[in-house]
Amino acid sequence: MIKRTPLALVIACALLCAGFASAEEGMWMLHQLPALQGKLRTAGLALSPEEIWDFKTNTGLAAAIPSLGGCSASFVSPDGLIVTNHHCAFSAIQMNSTPEHDYITDGFLARTRAEELDTKTTRVSVFKGYEDVTAKVLGQLPASLSAEQRSKAIEKIQKELVAECEKDGLRCRFAEMFGGGSYYLFRSLEIRDVRLVCAPPNGVGNFGGEVDNWMWPRHSGDFSFLRAYVGPDGKPADASPNNVPYRPDRWLKVAADGVKEGDFTMIMGYPAKTYRYKTAAQVANDVEFYYPRRIEILGSLIDILENEGKRGKDIEIRLASWLKGLYNSYKNNQGVLAGLRQVDLAGKKLEEEKRLAAWITADLPHRRTFADVLPGLARLQEEKNASRERDLLLSFLPQDRRPTLLNAATIIERWTFERTKPDAERKLDYQARDESTLRQRLVTIQKSLDAPTEHRVLTYLIGCAAKLPAAQRINAVDQLLGTTGQTGDAAIAAAVDRLLAATKLADQSVRLALFDGDHAAVLSSDDPMLKFAAALRSDVEAKEAAERRWDGESTTLVPRLIEALAAWQGDTRYPDANSTLRFTYATVKGYEPRDGVIYKPFTTVRGVMEKNTGVEPFDAPKRLLEAAAAGADARWRDPRLGDVPACFLSTNDITGGNSGSPVMNAHGELVGLAFDGNWESMTSDYQFSSELSRTINVDIRYVLWFLETVDGADELLREMAIPSERR
Amino acid sequence: MIKRTPLALVIACALLCAGFASAEEGMWMLHQLPALQGKLRTAGLALSPEEIWDFKTNTGLAAAIPSLGGCSASFVSPDGLIVTNHHCAFSAIQMNSTPEHDYITDGFLARTRAEELDTKTTRVSVFKGYEDVTAKVLGQLPASLSAEQRSKAIEKIQKELVAECEKDGLRCRFAEMFGGGSYYLFRSLEIRDVRLVCAPPNGVGNFGGEVDNWMWPRHSGDFSFLRAYVGPDGKPADASPNNVPYRPDRWLKVAADGVKEGDFTMIMGYPAKTYRYKTAAQVANDVEFYYPRRIEILGSLIDILENEGKRGKDIEIRLASWLKGLYNSYKNNQGVLAGLRQVDLAGKKLEEEKRLAAWITADLPHRRTFADVLPGLARLQEEKNASRERDLLLSFLPQDRRPTLLNAATIIERWTFERTKPDAERKLDYQARDESTLRQRLVTIQKSLDAPTEHRVLTYLIGCAAKLPAAQRINAVDQLLGTTGQTGDAAIAAAVDRLLAATKLADQSVRLALFDGDHAAVLSSDDPMLKFAAALRSDVEAKEAAERRWDGESTTLVPRLIEALAAWQGDTRYPDANSTLRFTYATVKGYEPRDGVIYKPFTTVRGVMEKNTGVEPFDAPKRLLEAAAAGADARWRDPRLGDVPACFLSTNDITGGNSGSPVMNAHGELVGLAFDGNWESMTSDYQFSSELSRTINVDIRYVLWFLETVDGADELLREMAIPSERR
């Protein structure tokens, strides 16, 4: 059977949605809200911008919405109770799971605070406000700087500003907006004792699994509860039994009545990355090279991990979190690529750039200000394309954030190397402020290490590197293989054998001793994995230098591109997502994915029963099915749906990183948790569509129904102050 | 990826739809309409039952609705113009196609009557009324007859009644209703000069192909036009240039305004077969054996034909019609099986039968009348199950209606054999009245014969027969292979080699000479295919005798089962479909296939563009896409949809055989053509569901838009008297 892409209607949208017109579009920064106040009020928001965040007092609703690594979350009780997505808490669940206590399969509920489980790596960053530092950054830059000098100068100012900001236990994050048009310094309180309170079984939290991922109608109960703990002094502290629940400034009230179709919804969270200002040439590279090659590599890695997982339940658990991430990227990348092709975004952008160029050319002041922008960006992309095969592989090879010994070696080697420099001159993410994070990673990978899997992964990636063209070799790989030409599979496997057989890094104490030792000790060690990591650093540093040059050039061009676009089209712009706190407002609304089909904005518990086959990923637990079959509990039932709602759609503009974000009603009360985007809008990181872009949310009533009826988590409901007439 | 069955919601229905309650259910006989008159008027019908058919004058709307072999059709002009489905005219299109004139791919339009193409095999049976002959049949049967005697006696009366009826060029069909509770004699005028007038390209008529088959939303322009011709004397005649267009008593006015959601629709046509009165044991046999085994065999035959078709475009065309039929059965059978399993219809019927049995037992008169019915039917099914593997293969082996030499041999051998008996004693379908049909088939298979394909098909089927258990051997196969035990593949292939190498039947003149000769000549021929056919006849006759016995028993049991059900539940019953004219009334209505999804009742031309990939089966012709892109032509545009409609759904109760049926509005005007049922109601032959059973129709406005805008078929539009303000 032909597998049809469901993206067909995007064509229609491509004609309708050009430009920046839709009410729902926009991942706004909080200081932009006063300018939107009229629209917000019309849309239904009952709060003032100051109630969301008051920049004078640094207080407001946003204090209830912390970042959670790559996810978002919200406080829902004065005792530091946090709700986020199941998939955001997944590695914490995995970390605590064993074949005997399989919390992935069975779920987890702490009946008392003493039963809460240490999540080890999870960090909660509580929002504390931000300030505009554009003048501090750009005011200091001489115009005469080369691209690389400019980039280095900005990085230097960044480090100074961050160092100055990080006192009183605050963490600070320097963020570039509009491609370098402005800069902000975000403050947060980083809490590092975070415990698992409640997670549903995988057959609830991940119901539908990869089949339903990115899809609507959806029936996943993608939620989990954590709790933030601090030292007895109220300050962030390492995990300890003496710690006490953190008392957040603000927490969200749970709106147990939920929402209905057409209701106002707003989402705050930490969207990671969008590409709304990419040029035609950048999009063309994504379509022709970047996504196709990534999909190839991700597919191969998935094959490897799936196969290795078959060796046993324990291996499967070890690899579960890594594999989950791969699946997600793989399906996402496929959807984005199909979507970009379908709408021919590169072609459309080219047309738009032609019209923009004509507008620039038609007017002398425009010409003086903008004439070099489009040609400059085109040249820049051409330069990047020359090494793109190698650069992509270099992004995979050190296995960043993957549980492998090569990643451990990379961290140890780079950390000890950077530590030889003054703190301000070190690579970002390798400064003194990052030490505990890096050390922690060397500890937590222990539970996920698997030598046979790493063997196959490295053999595959080094095999890819061995096939690179002559102009794009990775020297570390050539040295490892002892040749600069092509190399056979056997030679590669043998080289990987040597790496893994002789390394001592599988021993956690060895890793930590090396990490705490000095770089000379690392260099003089005869551990082949460390040697390979050191060699790889030279390749990575060369790439970093090139990137610094490109970034320096980019920061002089992109802000002017956006300025030109805004002047040309006469509108207000929001910056691309960059993992800083953003605000999006919209409504609860279904959509028409294709001719003849309407997707309703709500799914229900009845739909869980419909989809359930008893076979993963459609394997809801028996107790849920029984509760559902016993009749929808009237307390969580939506009378309009005649059932307990499961998930709902809203037109909010979100992306990865927003996972776990609270969906709030007009009064800022919690009505759901954002956990996915829909398949028809996989290109929304490039272009938002009012007709097709939707956020998929788990309905808070499904969470409450599960907690009460299925899980019997009365204490949690009490803590969230669920109204008594609802209990 | 897990392939989920979309039938999940059927479960919900299984709970809601038990019993016979829905307004839309029912394939009614025309004489039942007066009893329904109140309901019909409430539903919106503007005609009286007598306007549909007046049994006194034998006139009415039904005269416009002929049968077309296994399909239905309607007259749409006073000059015998007929509209039906593209898939119903497909073999006529195939018959006229060559690699040079590929009307399958390119479509066909006769610009003048002289250009109309002889369809050779197509026959049009014009409805002329029917009468109840129950008394004539049952009144003559002594109570003392054995089952086989009873069956033979009924067959004898049937032949007498048919012979008596068939004068003045009429064809008569004897039909059993309610499993033998009543009998009817249907009269028709059979026209055998039928020409192809207009067929869209396959990329329109079969747009979506097997992917979309049985599916909604649908975008197939499944229509074609034929014309009926008769001799200059107005009587049916063999094809001849001297023939003149048939002038039907009635033809349908085309309602160029179409229908909208909620409108009344009625369909008349010739539904082939339903199983609404099957018992639990019968359904269990279907689920456990019949469908699984059929799916296996059909799948293997599809593989064979697909592979052989790769040998060349000409072979592909030769096999196209056969393959299309296989695809359709295959997907249908899979859907039915999945649906029967999903709703556990056998289990539900068992429950129902238990309750019925209790009702029967609870009352002495009920006990006296019905006590033996359920046990009798159970015993009967058990008896049938004992030879079901052999019987199923015997239904495939003679290749009934398939273009093979074995089928030709079967026809020749059986025809000449039956002709040795008096006409009234011959096998049904092999009487003098059937001679021209049978002879025609020996001619028309010529264009579809392909020896390598037949070799592989016979090798496969004989291979299946060779594996039958000892108690169920097919003697003809054992003789052919010269053994009664298991036989290797090589021996089977060699036997088939011998059959095909030595037979002379590939020569049409040989076939016809043998057909017209006597049985002795056939028997004494040394043609191995004829010898195999003769041997196979003994096996088939044994099966026929058993079936006659079973049928005899069944006709004493099933009518009383239905009587008991009607008495128990107190309702009116319609008989199972049996290819006789039926009436169903309903409304235009979408449905909810699963939680969160609504299927709208209309699709549009925009949807054709969305689905189009340029690759079969989503390969709409360029001129259609251009016409669509040029903007929906306002004349055929539905203002509510903002586009030209393509297909629509109605709640009519139809099944196979209804293909090509006119969908009519409240005034009996043509608004569409029924061409499919939806996937979610694949079990509707067993059980109708108001929530999920839908008829898929091509909207007449799509037909008109195509004819005018894409095809430029002005003459056809004029002939159908399309209102001038629409043209």
Image (spheres, coloured by chain):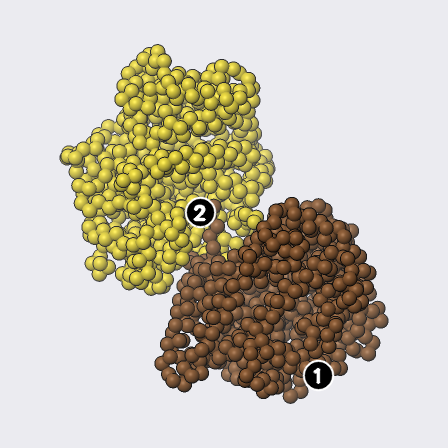
Chain colours: A yellow, B brown
Res. A211 mark: 2
Query: Residue B240 at x, y = what percent?
Result: 83, 69
The residue at the point 64 percent across, 81 percent down is B157
- Check disc 1 and report the residue beneath it: B164
Quick one: label 1, few (<14), some, or many (20+) residues within 10 Å? few
* SS for dot 1: helix
Is the C-beta separation of discs 1 and 2 under 8 Å? no
Task: Please state which of the two labelled residues, at mark 1 or mark 2, is closer to the viewer.
Answer: 1
Identity of the residue drawn at 42% across and 79% down: B371
Pinpoint residue A628: horizontal percent, then vertical percent.
32, 59
Chain on which label 2 sits = A
Q: Chain of mark 1?
A: B
Counting every numbered tag in the picture gives 2
Horizontal side of residue A327 vs B620, given as left or right = left
Amino acid identity at mark 1: Glu
Residue B692 in the image: x percent, y percent? 48, 65
